[in-house]
Every structure is written in C-alpha cells, then in structure tokens.
Image (cartoon, grey):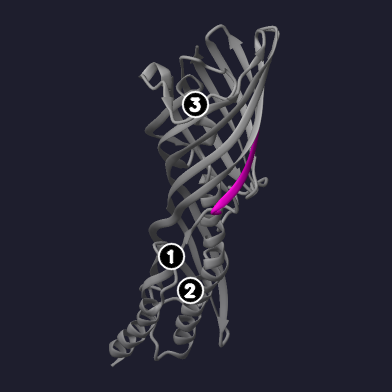
Amino acid sequence: MKKLFSCLALLFFQSLCLASTDPFQIVNRTSDLDPNDPNQNAVLTALNSAADQIENTINTTFLSDASQQTFVSAMAEANASNSNALIVDRASNPQKFSVGILAQGNTYSLNSGAFETNNSFPSAGAAGQASLSIGVNASKLGISKIGFIDGKKLMLYINGSRFSYSMDKATVGLTNFGFNAQYKIIEKKGNHFFGWGGLDASLGVNYGNNSLLYAANIKQSTTTTVNGQTASVNVDMDYSFGIDSWNLNFPLEISSNVNFLYAFSLFAGGGVDFNVGSTALKGSASGPVTASASTQAGGGNLFSANSSLNLENGISGKPSLVTARGFGGLQLNLAVLKVVVEGHALSNKTIGAAAMIRVAL
C-alpha cells in the first residue's frame, strides 16, 4: 500500500508537468519519501512546491513570451537592411568595374550588458554580413542603351557569400546574395584635387540569412516550508538557443560624394528600404535538478528530477516593412585600391557600420 501511494503521488506530479506547455519544466520527478509519514509527506509537498515555483519564476520572467518576443523582434530589426552598405560603390565613381570584399554589422537598441544578463534572453539584437561584390559598367556588357537609360552611366552589381564562424559562446552562419543597379543621374565635375562625384541613384533586391547558436545558463533556487518542513530545489542548467533570421530587402537610395587632395573621398546619402522577413527562436536543453530538505528519505532518494527546456514554441519576429536609412563615410584612395569605412542609421532605431576594400577603375 505504501508503494501504491508513492506511485500515485509520483504520477500525479508528473502529470502536472506533462500538461504544461511552458518552455521550462522540471520533469521526471522521483522520491523515496513516504507520503504516509506526515513529516516526509510535508517534505515531498515542499519539494514539489519549490520545483513548481522555479518553473513559474523562469517561465513568467526569464523565459516569458514577452521576453522571447522582444528578443526575436530586436533580431529581426537588426537583420533588416543588413547588407545595404555592401550593395554598390558610393565613392569611387567607377566607369569600368568595381570589385570589393565587404563586411557590415548592425545593432538594434543595444545597451551595456544586454548580452550578459543571466537567466534571460539578450535585450537587444545584432546582425552581420560579409560579402564579395562585383560591379561592371553596363556598356562593358554590350548594353549601350535601355530606353532613356544610358549604358555608360549604369553600373550593375552582384554580391554574395556563405560561411560560418565561432566566437566565445556563439556560432554564427551567414548567407547573402543580391543584384543592384546604380545610375549616374548627374555627371561628376571637378578634378582629382577637388571634385564632386555627381548624383547617383541605386535600387535592387538583396537576400540575407543569419543563423546564431548561443550558449547560456539558467540558475535558480527556491526554498519552501510546509508544516514546519523545509525543502530547497536548485537548478543550474547549461543550454543553447538558436536564431534563424531571413530578410528580403528592396533598397532605393540617392548618394553623392566629393574627393579632395587625390587621396580622400567623402560620401553620404539616404534612402528607403522595403523589408520582408522573419526571425524564429529555437532551442532545447536538459539538466539535473538537486534538492535538500530537513527530513531525509531513510537513506533513499530524497528527490531527483530533470530540467527541460524547449524553445520551439512558434514565437517569431518580423522587421519593419519600410525603414528610412541615412549613411555616410570616408574612402581612402590609393590609386585603384580603395579602403572604405561607413556608418549608417535607420528609422527603426538600428545603427551599424561597415568596412570595405575595393579595386575600382
């Protein structure tokens, strides 16, 4: 009869766990405490109550739907327009070709310590891309005129890359490709000592995908007293969560530049980006749960359980459909070799920077 009561109590508490759809659960709870003994039953009740409190604390605070939604939405915004610094050459005024290796990073609402908060998702978003860009003047491809468009004033660009890398607690995978066109609306004026690069208009379509696997930790402990019996439950679980974010971007921008003293060029511009995309959060982990109590189980198992985390709950974030973008930068001209740094800001509170090395003629 004693074993029957123990089994029934165990099945009852396990059924409560299995019925939960919360991302964090304490499952497979077992104990050799005798539910017929008033003191041991009080301890068993206190242990399960402590475990339930930890579940509730983590699920309603650290892993709440609101916390997850904030994170994936921030990541979606950071990924929007995440390759737009890479799409065209804004300072060289190339007449034949422009080839470059480029890298860009974006952050959304980044604040100090946002990625170091324990027991919580980061409260900011970040994204990056790197790409090989190749631009050719349309006239070199045999395109002399398309309607009113002069092929000599038209640069056509393709860009793309796919790779992954690891750093500290994170593993990142990046994929991007795009096609963009840049047209010289107003011709450049001046000379190499000082000149104005005219006015350029650019548009295109660009796809980007960022995948992130980030290692983190959940620590939580709770002590509960029932009928004078005190019990503590402790969770210290390493886990990882993943982000998969894709974005399809349609940029439309105007830019201009000036060059001076042969070696330097300044450029600036603005535009509007149209974004379609989604960011989803995925992850799972498990780990042991430890416990202590004022009454032991006669040398047997006081309390054992496993922690379980499942983040595949369908929560996703989407970028702003339309964002305004401003940008500016400096280019160092070493004959045909160009070294570029650029900064940009978007109306969705995203800021970013890019660095590039180009060969342009």
Q: Residue at x 53, y 53 (%)?
A: 319
Q: CA distance from mark 2 to mark 3?
A: 50 Å
- The answer to whether residue 13 is above or below residue 289 is below
Q: CA distance from mark 2 to mark 1?
A: 9 Å
N-terminal of the pair, mark 3 or mark 1, is 3
Residue 3: tell me if it is visible.
Answer: yes
Circle 2 residue: 51
Image quadrant containing the N terminus: bottom left
Q: Residues within 10 Å of mark 3 (few under 14, many from 20)?
A: many
In the rendered image, the vertical position of residue 82 relative to residue 265, given as above or below:
below
Give the CA distance from mark 3 to mark 1: 47 Å
User: Which amino acid, by three-letter code, is at mark 3?
Assistant: Leu
Relative placement, left or right, of 27 versus 348 is left
What's drawn in magenta, residue-wise? Answer: 320-327
Residue named by callout 1: 289
Q: Residue furthest front?
A: 147
Q: Mark 2: which secondary structure?
A: helix
Q: Residues within 10 Å of mark 1 (few under 14, many from 20)?
A: many
- Where is residue 284? Give x, y as percent: 38, 58
Label 3: which residue? Answer: 102
Residues at marks 2 and 1 touching, judged by CB atoms closer than 8 Å: yes
